């Protein structure tokens, strides 16, 4: 087949790149490190966006939009924040070009230098908290629950489509609260939203936890995360929610008057997921034949392929397929008829297999006569002949089963590749084959850094609600209050 992809076993990284490109999700752009998200890939993002947006609004949040440009002085107000992002910032210094002396090209006009340089947002805490200062005066203005759908720029040197690009799409929630308790509850609640979305929409099991000090968001007091396992045994951070304390409120002097008239700094959170989730979907579910997409977010849930010979037979098939398409659409199923007459049906089968369409219906003249249809499911690559009567009910049930099966398969994979270790020598040996490792750690940054240096593995999270079994650090032998999750990661 022309669109054949490298196998996962042969080269997982190349397999991933093959799928992104050949399934038509994205491609590299003329700007180094940036990507063009193609219609099929963007439709996948839109479905994720739509589901998440409803979940945000159902929990009381509203959407807003804040500027792309941030005055450099804003970023400098929160010391830890600027240190965390300084190396990734794109800086705007001038606002005009002019012709060169020979008139053959353009150059920056030195007379058009900005009075203050602008940062292309790597994240929006600073510009938003400068704005919140004008919005918040008293406890009646709280809580303030805003989200924005936007792009951000982080000038990455080593990039990979969807997983790490210089510019990417995301959502970022930014909330303000009257008490520490309310802000912590908000951060944990939004982590729960992400976990729900990963499990019930993306069919990806995740571990919820807290980041270590070295891994937490720059400027946060605590960072909560969801960690997913990819099919090569590496971890992927699929979403984060941050309790920011009063750090940004202090930096931008955002105070409120309590019911007693006492002025205090507000408490803050921020949280976000990005187009990195598309990369997570690919690496968690897909196979050597192409994408395998969960029905709930698939751009196309069902494709109908008529099998015909000649124009007369095609016209007959079209009318029949339209009837089936209509019945499926009335059940809320997204469906397409591929009646292109310049491609063989076998090519079409392979194409939709590559694109990960969950269900394929094939109908030929004999099926019309017998009142049947061939139904193929992408997750198991199995086929069956079923009656066309009540086909919408059969397909609806099948889509639900595919969604459930994909989650259970990913969960089984994670369970089979999660290990409990106590010996550092055992850890160093097994980490070479990937997986999640539940091990004791003494809680020090020095030990964490040494393990990372020697094994390339990091503490992905301290599990929330994890087993509180005490023990000894696998490296130093010092006391440990619970096991943490180690893994190599993207």
Image: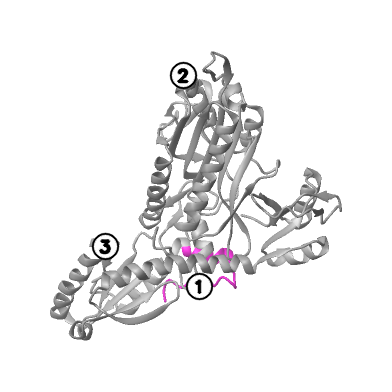
Residue 288 is marked as: 1
Q: Where is residue 470 in the image (x, y as percent from the top left)?
A: 79, 53
Q: Where is residue 13 in the image (x, y as percent from the top left)?
A: 58, 63
Report the span colored magenta.
1-19
What is the C-alpha distance between the residues marked 1 and 2? 54 Å
Q: Position of residue 269 (x, y in %)?
A: 55, 34
Question: Crowding at label 3, few (<14), some or many (≥20) Cα neighbours within 10 Å?
Answer: few
Q: Quadrant of the N terminus?
A: bottom left
From the viewer's perspective, tell me whether residue 473 is left or right of residue 44. right
* Looking at the image, residue 236 lies above or below residue 315: above
* SS type, badge 2: helix
- Residue 477 or 19: which is nearer the viewer? 477
Q: Does the magenta stretch include residue 296?
A: no
Taking the spot 25% from the left edge, 74% from the top edge, the residue there is 342
- Coloring applied to the structure: one colour
In terms of sequence position, does the residue under pointer 3 or pointer 2 come before the other? 2
* Looking at the image, residue 49 lies above or below residue 281: above
Picture quadrant where residue 414 is located: bottom right
> Are the residues tagged 3 and 2 within 8 Å (C-beta)?
no
Residue at image mark 3: 331
Residue 134 is marked as: 2
In terms of sequence position, does the residue under pointer 1 or pointer 2 come before the other? 2
* Looking at the image, residue 216 lies above or below residue 231: above
Taking the spot 64% from the left edge, 55% from the top edge, the residue there is 489
Question: Crowding at label 2, few (<14), some or many (≥20) Cα neighbours within 10 Å?
Answer: few
């Amino acid at each position: 087949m022309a669109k054949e992809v490298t196998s996962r076993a042969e080269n997982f990284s190349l397999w991933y790149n093959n799928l992104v490109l050949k399934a038509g999700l994205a491609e590299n752009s003329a700007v180094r490190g940036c990507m063009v998200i193609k219609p099929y890939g963007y439709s996948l993002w839109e479905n994720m966006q739509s589901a998440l947006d409803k979940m945000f609004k159902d929990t009381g949040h509203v959407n807003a939009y804040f500027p792309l440009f941030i005055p450099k002085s804003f970023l400098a107000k929160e010391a830890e924040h600027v240190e965390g992002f300084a190396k990734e910032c794109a800086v705007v210094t001038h606002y005009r070009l002019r012709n060169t002396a020979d008139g053959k090209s353009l150059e920056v006009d030195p007379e058009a230098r900005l009075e203050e340089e602008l940062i292309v947002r790597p994240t929006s805490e600073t510009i938003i908290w400068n704005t919140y200062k004008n919005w918040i005066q008293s406890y009646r203005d709280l809580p303030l629950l805003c989200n924005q759908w936007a792009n951000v720029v982080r000038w990455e040197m080593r990039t990979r489509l969807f997983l790490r690009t210089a510019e990417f799409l995301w959502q970022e929630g930014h909330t303000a609260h009257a008490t520490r308790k309310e802000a912590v509850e908000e951060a944990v609640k939004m982590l729960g939203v992400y976990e729900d979305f990963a499990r019930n929409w993306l069919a990806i099991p995740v571990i919820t936890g807290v980041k270590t000090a070295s891994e937490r968001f720059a400027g946060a007091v605590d960072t909560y995360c969801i960690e997913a396992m990819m099919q090569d045994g590496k971890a992927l951070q699929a979403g984060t929610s941050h309790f920011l304390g009063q750090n940004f409120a202090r930096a931008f002097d955002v105070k409120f008057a309590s019911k007693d008239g006492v002025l205090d700094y507000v408490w803050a959170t921020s949280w976000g997921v990005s187009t990195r989730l598309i990369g997570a979907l690919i690496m968690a579910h897909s196979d050597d034949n192409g994408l395998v997409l969960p029905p709930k977010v698939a751009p196309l849930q069902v494709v109908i392929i008529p099998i015909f010979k000649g124009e007369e037979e095609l016209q007959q098939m079209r009318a029949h397929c339209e009837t089936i398409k209509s019945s499926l659409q009335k059940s809320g199923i997204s469906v397409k008829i591929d009646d292109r007459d310049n491609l063989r049906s076998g090519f079409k089968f392979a194409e939709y297999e590559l694109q990960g369409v969950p269900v394929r219906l094939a109908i030929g003249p004999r099926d019309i006569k017998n009142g049947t249809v061939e139904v193929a499911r992408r997750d198991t690559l199995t086929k069956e002949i079923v009656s066309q009567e009540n086909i919408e009910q059969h397909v609806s049930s099948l889509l639900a089963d595919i969604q459930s099966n994909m989650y259970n398969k990913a969960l089984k994979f994670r369970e089979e590749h999660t290990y409990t270790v106590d010996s550092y020598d055992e850890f160093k040996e097994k980490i070479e084959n990937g997986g999640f490792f539940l091990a004791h750690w003494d809680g020090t940054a020095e030990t964490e850094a040494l393990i990372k240096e020697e094994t390339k593995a990091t503490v992905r999270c301290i599990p929330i609600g994890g087993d509180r079994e005490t023990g000894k650090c696998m490296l130093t032998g010092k006391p440990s209050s619970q096991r943490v999750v180690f893994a190599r990661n993207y």
